[in-house]
Image (cartoon, grey):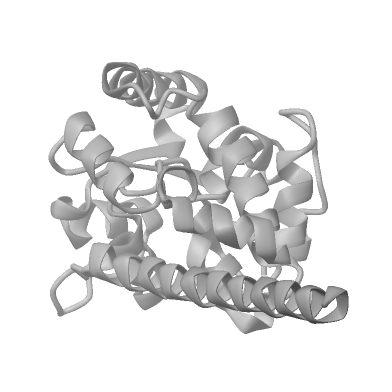
Amino acid sequence: MTLELIGAGFGRTGTWSTFAALNRLGFPSYHMQEVIINKANKGHLDFWRKVANSQPGSQHDWNRVFANYRATVDNPGCCVWRELMAAYPEAKVLLTLHPRGAEAWYDSTIDTIYFTENVWQFKVLEWLTPFGRKFGDMSRKLVWGRTLKGVMDDRDKAVARYNAYISEVKAAVPPEKLLVFKASDGWAPLCDFLGVALPNEPFPNLNDRASIKKIISGMIMGSYAMLAGVALAIAFAIGGLWWWLG
C-alpha cells in the first residue's frame, strides 16, 4: 500500500469527518488519532517527534508510519505535506477548509486541540509522563511552531496565517492534483476527485469536538491523580523526616 492522498488542511477543518469518509471509500487514512489512540501504531509518536526536531524539508522513512494507509489527513501529516509530495509524487493533495471560515477554525482550535499549550493540567503530564513530554514536544514544534508559526495566542495573526497557508498550498500544487474541500460539500467532489462511486448514505458528520473534549477530560483527571500521588509522597517523606529527626 502506498500513500495516494495527502491531506494538507489544518486540524479542526472537518478532518475527522473526512477521515471517516475516506475510510468508507476504501482509502485507509492516517489522522492524529492514529498516533495517540491506535495501539497498533506503537512508536509513531517517537517517529513524529523526530520529524518535529529535524529541519523542515527533511525526508524520513515515511513508509514506517504510512505503510498501511492510502491517505493522510489532519495533524501531523498536514505539517509535512510538501515533504510528502516529494516522497509520493503520484499522490493527490486534499486541502480541507473549515466550513465557516478562518475565525470559526480558530475558535474551534483554541477550544480543543490547543490544549497542549493552554491547559495547565497537560503541563503536569509533560512534567510527570514520557507520553506528555513526547506529545508536547512534537505538537509544540511541528504543529504550533513550524506550521502555525507560533501565532496561536494572537487571534488576528492566526487567522491571517490560516488564509496565507491556503494560498501557499494552492500556489504549490498543480490544480489538477488539488481538491479544496469542505466537509459540508459532501460526497460528490471528493468521489469525483478520487474516481470512486458515490456511497448511498449521508456524508459523515462526526462530533469530534465532543470526542476531543473527552480525551482532554481524561488527561486532566490523570494529571489530578498524579498530583495527588506526588503530594502524598511528599507528605510521607516529610513525615518520615520529622520522625527520623525527632
Q: Is residue 171 above or below residue 199?
A: above
- Residue at left 68%, top 55%? 133
Residue 218 in sight from this viewpoint: yes
- The quarter of the image holding the C terminus is bottom right
Residue at x 38%, y 65% (from the top left corner): 19
> Could you say which is closer to the camera, residue 191 or residue 227?
227
Q: Give the x, y percent position of residue 122.
A: 51, 57
Residue placed furthest toward the front: 246
* Residue 243 relative to residue 95: left or right: right
Indicate left or right for 177 with 56 as reference.
left
Q: Quadrant of the N terminus?
A: bottom right
Up-down relation of residue 213 to residue 148 (above or below): below
Residue positioned most to the right: 244
Question: What residue is drawn where x is 30% and y is 66%?
Answer: 213
Q: Position of residue 128 (x, y in %)?
A: 67, 64
Place of residue 222 in the rendered image (x, y in percent of width and height, measured from the top left): 50, 75
Instruction: Provide residue 94's location: percent of width, then percent of height.
Output: 41, 45
